[in-house]
Image (cartoon, rainbow, N blue to C red):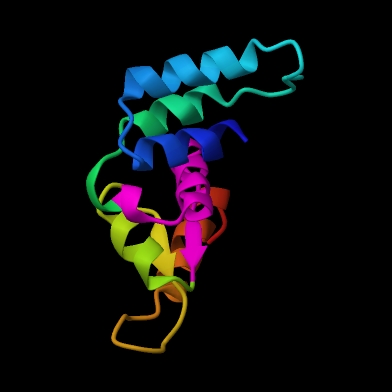
Amino acid sequence: MVLETATVLLKRGLSKSNVEEKLWKLLHREEVMVTDIPVNLFVKLTHFSGDIMQLKTYDLVLATMGIEYNALILTFDKKIRGKVKSIFPYVYYCSSEGRMKNELQLFAQEFTKRVGKS
């Protein structure tokens, strides 16, 4: 919920400090129970700009989590591949439809390298 709220507020043009202020006020309300605050993800999200901020909210949250955890992101979505790849190298497109190249083999190679198998 925190990341989705932050994403929407940033997309609507609120400043980073204004978003942070609003979120802290929300989180300190008596009615709100906080179980996990992904602070690192929020900080990373507030530093994004340009094309990546044009992604749909849930795509942006998933991309932010993938970037924060240095994960391999495998997607069928050309927009995610294009916008996230410009700031994070481990995004792979897994379809042969359209003009984009299927990167499933590159994904498998990187995955194998990470888990230490040959």
**Residue 23 in the figure: left or right of residue 19:** right
Q: Please, is residue 19 above or below residue 78 in the view?
A: above
Residue 5 horizontal/vertical position (percent): 53, 35
Q: Is residue 54 shown in magenta?
A: yes
**Residue 51 in the figure: left or right of residue 95:** left
Residue 93 horizontal/vertical position (percent): 41, 71
Q: Exactly how many numbered labels are in the figure?
A: 0
Nearer to me, 1 or 70: 1
Q: Please, is residue 35 above or below residue 62 in the view?
A: above
Picture residue at 74% right of the left edge, 22% below the top: 35
Segment tinted magenta in the rendering: 52-75
Picture residue at 45% right of the left edge, 82% below the top: 95
Nearer to me, 94 or 46: 46
Picture residue at 41% right of the left edge, 87% below the top: 96
Picture residue at 30% right of the left edge, 58% below the top: 83
Q: Quadrant of the N terminus?
A: top right
Nearer to me, 36 or 112: 36
Q: Magenta: predominant secondary structure element?
A: helix
Nearer to me, 54 or 106: 54
Residue 89 horizontal/vertical position (percent): 32, 52
Q: Is residue 104 shown in magenta?
A: no
Residue 8 horizontal/vertical position (percent): 45, 41
Q: Please, is residue 77 above or below residue 100 in the view?
A: above
